[in-house]
């Protein structure tokens, strides 16, 4: 061939299209080929050459593969816009699919699958059927992928023509390429179908594990990823699988290594022998570290995954902290991830080394990295009590360099350190005050003001310091204003002298009359009222001892961590979000709680400050400063790192509506208690079985639980934690379960409160529960919230108000539902039964042979449900229609109703 | 599984664009480029290699100044996609000999043909140049490699990525030489990237070698090859005790922390005599990657002295000592040191009679830069710089400068002492004697001295 392809890009003076047309119809092969190349060149730069369709397709009948491929490339691009003309190509395609040359056969099927035109698809079926059974592996592997293409265009056709079975047969093919593609195609089809199509049995498992050894690297990834869905039956099988997969850790392809790691981690959960687990951890460490020698892009993926892995199995890399030290030429995204992991791996043993690194990073050039390094020092101080002092001295050294942003960042973390270790390090306040003038960032300013207010009695000139800020009060950001307000009140309560008194008047005036910010105004009014009615009470509230904050460096919610670990080596593990949160490909899936459930995990970035609870606009930035935090009961002992506290309801907390007002009831085990559904079977819980259900008794919601210890050891120290859920259900007090001897059981009624940790997003009845004890790992299980548990005793409505409410609600708030499987045999009994669940009967009428019943019910916060049930007594099928101001939760209502009527 | 693949130039021009599934909108390349160019999220100014915009996941790697990008809508294995992007770049380079915007544009038909065989419906089929040869029919139009860069000694090893540095063999694996016949030759490169961090007192805080044995074969008939490595090579930190007794001599055994191999490598006798056997596929590929944290002698010592010389002045002295044999010469050395932000002026003084050296004060990012064309083993070089400040330092000036960072390339030197003892080509005929090139090179990865 002569010349360069780029000449095809050059334009001609004469009309380009007519000239190309002429060349395409030339009698010389070479000229035609050149012309097609020119057409493709025009196409790739975005010119419309679709008018040449017929002329290009005419060149299709050729033995020259190079030319054929070019024509096919063109066809794929334009067939969609010229469906009628595309039919012209069908004959050639079908003929090609029976060509003696396997490359041409495969090419024909491959290309037809890419043309999403119905008429072409029809003609694809027969050739595809043949090619799936072709003698040549290249044709078979191309056909396997083609089934996935066809499924994407027309799923029914694939099922009708039995292509799924042919595809499954290919799993046993003797060519590993074919096996790999069949696995990939089946996995994709399964992903898009709600029916079980590609189930991995122990038989397929062993076949695929064998194929694994012969596959190309990419095929290995397909197979490993498909197999990771397999749940081994027992520890023995898990060990066997792991043994077959471990050699993949030595692969040069990072994707193979990570997929193997995923598989091993998953099977490890089942392996009981600690020796085997320890050994596996040892084997995984070097390959994981080696990933950090790859290109920075891959390093980033590896680091995001390692971040998850060390949260579950910190021992794997406990001794490898040095490999996470930042390199001079690491891209910033790699450095940031390394810092995060260094904090997670920091321990009393290596903290000196780690601090030395952080200190070095804190003097580097990149501002964001420097800030992160300073925060990292603070987080280590909070995490490691014995190292706190060393961390603080490093921070002080950094402050002395007087680089503005370093100082500000240091003050923010020192405030957190004060909250973690109250009354320990206040001697450094003097040093901090020296930097007061240089602070210009809101968060740093707010932190410094908080420190001054909190320790006003120890700072001689606290009033002067605060006063210097007051002048600019109206111009300060809300965050700083809130802190100034609280700090001034604290100062006044601690030093009720003339100066502070004047200051407080200025501040209260500024924060009530002069501001538009409702948060600020509300807080100021409450202080004002407190101070004017009962200064002693004000002291109790404002100066109350604050709960000690804890380390958040293991910041992921346990259930999210579980989900992410199951998704190691996928995008999910890079974003630290569950797949549903970002996968947008349309597919039928059950609605799930979205990522808002995971306030800490949903952010792929770096949220650090341990005391930062709220991050929205005008809300108080740090809970530490809120005077009401003290009155709020501390969260129950978490089964795992506590999730961020909810935005406190200011008034509710002050008037005593907080959950501390609810006295935990320790109900004795009720022998007549109904049997509870098993949520954690003993087989999963290493012998511990948990059955539980939400119940309502005397207007209170309880979590009725039964613990059965079938293990060989006594279990104690039970704790419980609920994940965020639609109704904000949370434990009102600690879980009261005595030590459980082996073979014994215990029942308990855990009082629950509502609206504590609400999740955003579409309503869901899922309640995720974590239970831990001192002997076993944390157990997670899902329960269902049946809405009727929430129905309040005051849900009865008068006829009049029922009718009025029904009319006042727009029709769009009416949701109908058929419950076909339900039979009501005895109206009386059903009414009683529903009334027992606070679903109150209002009226009944006859409509032909049907009975129509009306009910009312109410859930907390006064959301009413108006219910209409239509049925023929004794015959299956109940029609239900409800009206409610909150139709979003209608589906939950029907779930509950169905379960009530079935009972 | 990927949806689209495209290559963008540094200016954001679409050089190659292939849509495999038609489920991501056409404008994705522009969306991607705008996002990357104006990235500012989480306080970072460089886009991470994986991110999501409006439900589309974008992956990218940078190869010789080009952006190789893939998109998808599903929860795929990100390492698979990133690795694939690197491999596509390598396959194209194998075919074209040279990978750049010009060669891609000149060979677009071939590139599309390759892309169709490499990926089908978003699924990787093969990235082996060897396998692809049976399915790909276009011939490369070789761009003039000589025009690309002057043939300085350094260009025998072009700067490449960390794991797969590009060799300067700018010869297509498929194209014939002008003479019509291919020259029988095989290149084996032992490429090591070393990272060392010295403490302010000169101790080695961390040291690491990332090594690759890279092979590029132009042998016809794909004969089997045996590579023998150091016999006392051991792998895994646990192995140390077994081999310790051998280290009576100064050299000592080579202990790798970890290593992995290309899939074509057979390790049958590796445990016994440390030989690898393989039938090298066409194209460039890493035979073995390894990592070592065992202590080694760093090739350069860096001594830095900084002293205040009056209220608004300071003097910096950087001394580089090359601690390797005088028969070896390092090249393209650059030493950098950040200086206080309030530095306004710098005057430099070099050793008397210094040649091939340059100095520069990078005003915008407040950095000293000292470039040396070459350093002969055993020699010492010193740079003196007088700094002038616009304000007084905050007290301890050493906290506001540094660290010193150094980059270099040292041909025919390897820090790990890992060696290819012999390279055997199995071929019956006694007259068959292809060219065998075994080359060593060491490059600085992160070579840092704190102050």
Image (cartoon, coloured by chain):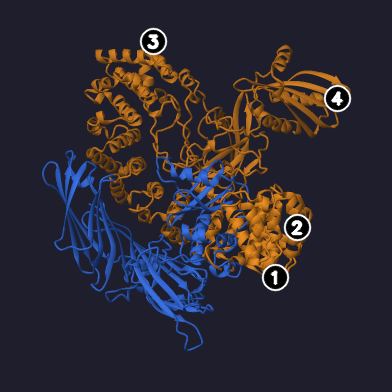
Chain colours: A orange, B blue
The residue beneath circle 1 is A101
Which tag is nearer the camera, tag 1 or tag 3?
A: 1
Q: CA distance from mark 2 to mark 4?
A: 59 Å
Q: CA distance from mark 1 to mark 2?
A: 18 Å
In the image, residue A194 above or below residue B215: above
Q: CA distance from mark 3 to mark 2?
A: 89 Å
On residue A850, the disc is: 4
Report if the CB atoms under discs 4 and 3 are less than 8 Å apart.
no
Same chain, marks 2 and 4?
yes
Same chain, marks 1 and 4?
yes
Counting residues from the N terminus, which is met first, the one under dot 1 or under dot 2?
A: 2
Q: CA distance from mark 1 to mark 4?
A: 71 Å
Counting residues from the N terminus, which is met first, the one under dot 3 or under dot 2?
A: 2
The residue beneath circle 3 is A533
Same chain, marks 1 and 3?
yes
The residue beneath circle 2 is A90
In the image, taking residue A555 as reference, residue A746 lies left or right, namely: right
Judge by depth and name the residue closer to the eye, A43 or A739.
Answer: A43
- List x then y, in percent, for residue B406: 28, 57
Same chain, marks 4 and 3?
yes
């Amino acid at each position: 061939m002569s010349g360069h392809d780029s000449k095809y890009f050059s334009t001609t003076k004469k009309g380009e299209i007519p000239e190309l047309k002429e060349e395409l119809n030339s009698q010389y092969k070479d000229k035609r080929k050149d012309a097609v190349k020119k057409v493709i060149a025009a196409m790739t730069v975005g010119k419309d050459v679709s008018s040449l369709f017929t002329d290009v397709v005419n060149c299709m009948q050729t033995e020259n593969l190079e030319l054929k491929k070019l024509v096919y490339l063109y066809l794929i691009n334009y067939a969609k816009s010229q469906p009628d003309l595309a039919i012209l190509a069908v004959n050639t395609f079908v003929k090609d699919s029976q060509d003696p040359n396997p490359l041409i056969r495969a090419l024909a099927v491959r290309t037809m699958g890419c043309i999403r035109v119905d008429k072409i698809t029809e003609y694809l079926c027969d050739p595809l059927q043949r090619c799936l059974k072709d003698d040549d592996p290249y044709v078979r592997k191309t056909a396997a992928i083609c089934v996935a293409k066809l499924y994407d265009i027309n799923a029914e056709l694939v099922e009708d023509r039995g292509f799924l079975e042919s595809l499954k047969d290919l799993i046993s093919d003797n060519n590993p390429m074919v096996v790999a593609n069949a696995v990939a195609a089946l996995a994709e089809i399964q992903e898009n179908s709600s029916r079980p199509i590609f189930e991995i049995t122990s038989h397929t498992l062993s076949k695929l594990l064998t194929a694994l050894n012969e596959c190309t690297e990419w095929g290995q990834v397909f197979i490993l990823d498909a197999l990771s869905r397999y749940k081994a039956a027992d520890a023995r099988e898990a060990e066997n699988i792991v043994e077959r997969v471990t050699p993949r850790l030595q692969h040069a392809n990072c994707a193979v290594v990570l997929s193997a790691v995923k598989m091993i981690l998953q099977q490890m959960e089942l392996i009981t022998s600690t020796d085997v687990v320890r050994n596996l951890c040892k084997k995984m460490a070097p390959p994981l570290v080696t990933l950090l020698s790859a290109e920075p892009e891959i390093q980033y993926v590896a680091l995001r995954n390692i971040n998850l892995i060390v949260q579950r199995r910190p021992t794997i890399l406990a001794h490898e902290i040095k490999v996470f030290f930042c390199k001079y030429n690491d891209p910033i995204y790699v450095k940031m991830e390394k810092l995060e992991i260094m904090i997670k791996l920091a321990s009393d043993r290596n903290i000196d080394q780690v601090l030395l690194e952080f200190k070095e990073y804190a003097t580097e050039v990149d501002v964001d990295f420097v800030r992160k390094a300073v925060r990292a020092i603070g987080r280590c101080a909070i995490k490691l009590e014995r190292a706190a002092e060393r961390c603080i001295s490093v921070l002080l050294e950094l402050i002395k360099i007087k680089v503005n942003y370093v100082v500000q960042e240091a003050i923010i973390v020192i405030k957190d350190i004060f909250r973690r270790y109250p009354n320990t390090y206040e001697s450094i306040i003097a040093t901090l005050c020296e930097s007061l003038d240089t602070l210009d960032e809101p968060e740093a300013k707010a932190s410094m003001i908080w420190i001054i207010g909190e320790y006003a009695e120890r700072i001689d000139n606290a009033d002067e310091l605060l006063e210097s800020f007051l002048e600019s009060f109206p111009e300060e950001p809300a965050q700083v204003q809130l802190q100034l307000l609280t700090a001034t009140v604290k100062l006044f309560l601690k030093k009720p002298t003339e100066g502070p008194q004047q200051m407080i008047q200025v501040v209260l005036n500024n924060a009530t009359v002069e501001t538009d910010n409702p948060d600020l105004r509300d807080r100021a009014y409450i202080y004002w009222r407190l101070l004017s009615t009962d200064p002693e009470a004000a002291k109790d509230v404002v100066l109350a001892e604050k709960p000690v904050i804890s380390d958040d460096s293991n910041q992921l919610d346990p259930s999210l961590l579980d989900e992410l670990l199951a998704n190691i080596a996928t995008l999910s593990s890079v974003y630290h979000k569950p797949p549903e949160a970002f996968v947008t490909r349309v597919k039928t899936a059950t609605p799930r709680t979205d990522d808002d459930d995971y306030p800490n995990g949903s952010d792929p970035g770096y949220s650090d400050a341990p005391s930062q609870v709220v991050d929205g606009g005008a809300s108080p930035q740090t809970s530490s400063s809120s005077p009401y935090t003290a009155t709020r009961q501390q969260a129950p002992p978490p089964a795992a790192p506590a999730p961020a506290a909810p935005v406190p309801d200011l008034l509710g907390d002050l008037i005593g509506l907080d959950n501390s007002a609810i006295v935990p009831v320790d109900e004795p085990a009720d022998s007549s208690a109904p049997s509870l559904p098993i949520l954690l079977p003993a087989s999963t819980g290493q012998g511990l079985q948990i059955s539980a259900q939400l119940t309502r008794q005397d207007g209170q919601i309880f979590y009725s639980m039964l613990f059965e210890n079938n293990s060989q050891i006594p279990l104690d120290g039970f704790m419980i934690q609920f994940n965020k859920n639609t109704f904000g259900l949370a434990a009102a007090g600690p879980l009261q379960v005595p030590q459980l001897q082996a073979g014994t059981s215990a029942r308990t009624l855990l009082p629950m409160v509502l609206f504590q940790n609400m999740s955003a997003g579409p309503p869901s009845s899922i309640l995720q529960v974590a239970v831990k004890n001192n002997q076993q790992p944390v157990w997670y299980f899902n329960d269902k919230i049946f809405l009727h548990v929430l129905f309040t005793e005051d849900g009865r409505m008068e006829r009049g108000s029922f009718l009025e409410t029904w009319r006042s609600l727009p029709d769009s708030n009416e949701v109908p539902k058929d419950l076909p499987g339900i039979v009501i045999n005895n109206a009386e009994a059903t009414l009683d039964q529903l009334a027992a669940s606070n679903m109150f009967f209002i009226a009944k009428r006859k409509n032909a042979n049907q009975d129509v019943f009306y009910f009312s019910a109410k859930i907390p916060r006064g959301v009413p449900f108006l219910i209409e049930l239509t049925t023929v007594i004794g015959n299956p099928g109940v029609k239900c229609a409800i009206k409610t101001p909150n139709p979003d939760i209608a589906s939950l209502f029907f779930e509950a109703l169905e379960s009530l009527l079935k009972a | 599984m990927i949806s689209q693949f495209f290559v963008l130039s540094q200016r954001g021009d679409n050089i190659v664009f292939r849509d495999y599934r038609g489920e991501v909108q056409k404008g994705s390349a522009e969306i991607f480029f705008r996002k990357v160019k104006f990235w500012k999220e989480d306080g970072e100014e460089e886009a991470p290699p994986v991110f999501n915009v409006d439900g589309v996941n974008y992956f990218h790697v940078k190869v010789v100044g080009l952006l190789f990008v893939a998109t998808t809508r599903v929860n795929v294995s990100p390492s698979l996609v990133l690795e694939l992007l690197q491999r596509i770049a390598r396959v194209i380079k194998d075919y074209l000999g040279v990978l750049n915007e010009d060669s891609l544009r000149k060979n677009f038909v071939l590139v599309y043909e390759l892309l169709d065989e490499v990926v089908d419906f978003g699924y990787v089929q093969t990235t082996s140049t060897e396998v692809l040869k049976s399915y790909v029919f276009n011939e490369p139009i070789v761009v003039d490699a000589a025009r690309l860069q002057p043939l300085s000694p350094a260009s025998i090893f072009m700067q490449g990525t960390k794991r797969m540095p590009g060799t300067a063999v700018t010869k297509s694996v498929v194209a014939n030489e002008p003479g019509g016949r291919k020259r029988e030759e095989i290149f084996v490169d032992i490429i090591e990237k070393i990272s060392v961090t010295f403490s302010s007192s000169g101790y080695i805080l961390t040291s690491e070698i990332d090594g690759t044995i890279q092979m590029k074969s132009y042998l016809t008939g794909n004969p089997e090859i045996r590579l023998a490595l150091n016999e006392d090579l051991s792998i895994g930190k646990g192995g140390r005790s077994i081999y310790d007794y051998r280290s009576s001599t100064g050299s000592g055994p080579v202990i790798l922390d970890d290593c992995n191999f290309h899939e074509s490598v057979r390790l049958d006798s590796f445990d016994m005599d440390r030989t690898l056997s393989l039938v090298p596929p066409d194209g460039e590929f890493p035979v073995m990657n390894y990592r070592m944290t065992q202590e080694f002698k760093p090739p350069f010592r860096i001594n830095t002295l900084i002293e205040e010389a009056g209220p608004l002045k300071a003097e910096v002295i950087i001394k580089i000592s090359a601690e390797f044999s005088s028969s070896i010469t390092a090249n393209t050395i650059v030493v950098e040191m950040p200086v206080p932000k309030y530095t306004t002026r710098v005057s430099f003084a070099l050793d008397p009679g210094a040649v091939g050296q340059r100095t520069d004060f990078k005003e915008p990012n407040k950095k000293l830069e000292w470039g040396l064309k070459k350093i002969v083993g055993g020699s010492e070089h010193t740079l003196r710089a007088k700094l002038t400040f616009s304000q007084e330092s905050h007290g301890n000036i050493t906290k506001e400068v540094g660290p010193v960072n150094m980059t270099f390339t040292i041909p025919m030197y390897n820090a790990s002492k890992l060696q290819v003892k012999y390279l055997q080509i199995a071929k019956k005929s006694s007259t068959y004697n292809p060219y065998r090139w075994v080359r060593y090179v060491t490059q600085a990865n992160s070579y840092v001295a704190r102050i």
